[in-house]
Image (tube, grey):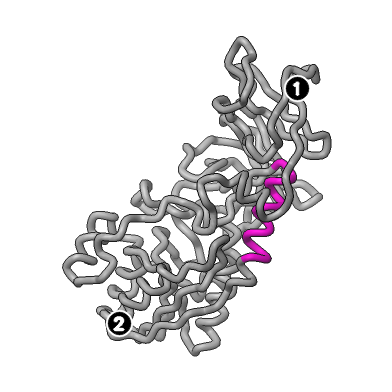
């Protein structure tokens, strides 16, 4: 059955091939690119790349101005989290609020049945419910940043690249003469320069230096401001401690950073909040799952226990390193995404 589909186009190879694939399958296709905030302007070059692909495919291209929403929701949250001693993953929030929020709403308003993206992820429907599965191509799998999708969002989403490797995507882009066929993949957070601490201070205010303390609470040095550190960090601490030391805790209220010795950067448990369960039968009972605590990390077996305060506690069989507040934690059974939340 042919459908009317809006393809979210970033100006990269993946989303461009997604649009071309769906067009060749006979669907009615439109492209949409988000206009996003950047410190020194916007993402005009990405918009132009996406438009050039749409022109080559002969499809209409929309630009959806999400500049203010992106700044207010994604960028401000990123800044506030870092200033509170957390290390956020802005791509998770952007997928939730912007790509599968504003962009999906726009697609539906235009009369489209679906929004399609270049994410490497699989959607299935059975037992009267939509399910999200890890891509079989684990190197490109993006399920970690999509655990929050609701049934409504899944119903109106398409992921046409799920059965292809990156090499096949590149080859199709070349064969179809797409203007972005040789464009490199983006590796960085789209709005963020390499000096993230400088960016945060420019967009908010400088942060004061404070004390390094050990796990006994003794002062052992001075840090440059909590923005410059993250859990598990060993290099760049700016001090000589006589032995390898790792960041194990950041306390924004006290402006202290706790350093631990080797082995103390491993965590046997964690608590998570702001939960979403795609597989809702797990929502109110303890269950064992394979757990990812950061993007592209290995999976750790653990017991996930829902609590009355709408959090979950997770106790691991094998302790992961550098469990970081603000990062997403995602639960799996095999390839199935059970759900996830934010590390407290």
Task: Please rate how many residues cluster around mark 1, counting C-alpha atoms within 10 Å: few if below 14, some from 14 to 19, many from 20.
Answer: many
Q: Quadrant of residue 265?
A: top right
| Residue at (80, 50) in percent of width and height | 309
Residue 262 falls left or right of residue 83: left
Q: Position of residue 297 (x, y in %)?
A: 48, 39
In this view, the residue in front, 227 or 167, is 227
Task: Residue 288: give x, y in percent of width and height.
Answer: 59, 41
The disc placed on residue 55 is 2
Name the chief secondary structure element in magenta.
helix
Residue projecting furthest to the left: 175
Disc 1 marks which residue?
213
Residues at marks 1 and 2, CA–CA distance in whole angstroms: 58 Å
Residue shown at the point (77%, 35%) measured from the top left: 251
Is 234 positioned to the left or the right of 31 in the image? right
Q: Is residue 54 magenta?
A: no
Boundaries of the magenta span: 71-85
* Image position of 2 (left or right of 32): left
Residue 254 sits above or below residue 56 on the image: above
Instruction: Give the label on residue 242, or none.
Output: none
């Amino acid at each position: 059955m042919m459908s009317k589909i809006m393809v979210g186009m970033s100006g990269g190879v993946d989303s461009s091939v997604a649009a071309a694939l769906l067009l060749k399958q006979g669907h009615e296709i439109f492209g949409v690119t988000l206009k996003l905030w950047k410190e020194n302007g916007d993402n005009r070059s990405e918009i132009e790349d996406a438009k050039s692909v749409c022109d080559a495919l002969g499809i209409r291209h929309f630009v959806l101005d999400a500049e203010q929403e992106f700044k207010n929701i994604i960028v401000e949250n990123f800044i506030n989290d870092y200033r509170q001693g957390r290390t956020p993953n802005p791509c998770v929030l952007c997928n939730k609020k912007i790509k599968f929020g504003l962009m999906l709403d726009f697609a539906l308003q235009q009369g489209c049945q679906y929004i399609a993206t270049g994410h490497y992820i699989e959607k299935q429907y059975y037992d009267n419910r939509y399910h999200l599965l890890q891509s079989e191509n684990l190197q490109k799998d993006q399920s970690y940043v999509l655990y929050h999708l609701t049934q409504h969002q899944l119903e109106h989403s398409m992921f046409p690249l799920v059965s292809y490797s990156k090499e096949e995507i590149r080859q199709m882009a070349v064969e179809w003469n797409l203007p972005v066929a040789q464009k490199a993949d983006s590796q960085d957070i789209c709005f963020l320069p390499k000096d993230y601490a400088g960016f945060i201070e420019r967009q908010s205010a400088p942060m004061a230096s404070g004390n390094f303390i050990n796990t006994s609470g003794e002062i052992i040095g001075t840090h440059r401001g909590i923005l410059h550190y993250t859990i598990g960090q060993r290099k760049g601490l700016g001090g000589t401690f006589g032995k390898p030391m790792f960041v194990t805790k950041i306390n924004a209220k006290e402006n202290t950073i706790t350093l631990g010795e080797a082995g103390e950067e491993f965590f046997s448990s964690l608590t998570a909040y702001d939960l979403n369960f795609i597989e809702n039968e797990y929502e109110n009972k303890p269950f064992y799952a394979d757990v990812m605590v950061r993007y592209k990390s290995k999976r750790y077996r653990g017991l996930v226990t829902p609590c009355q305060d709408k959090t979950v506690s997770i106790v691991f069989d094998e302790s992961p390193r550098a469990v970081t507040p603000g990062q997403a934690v995602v639960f799996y059974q095999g390839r199935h995404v059970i759900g996830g939340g934010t590390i407290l």
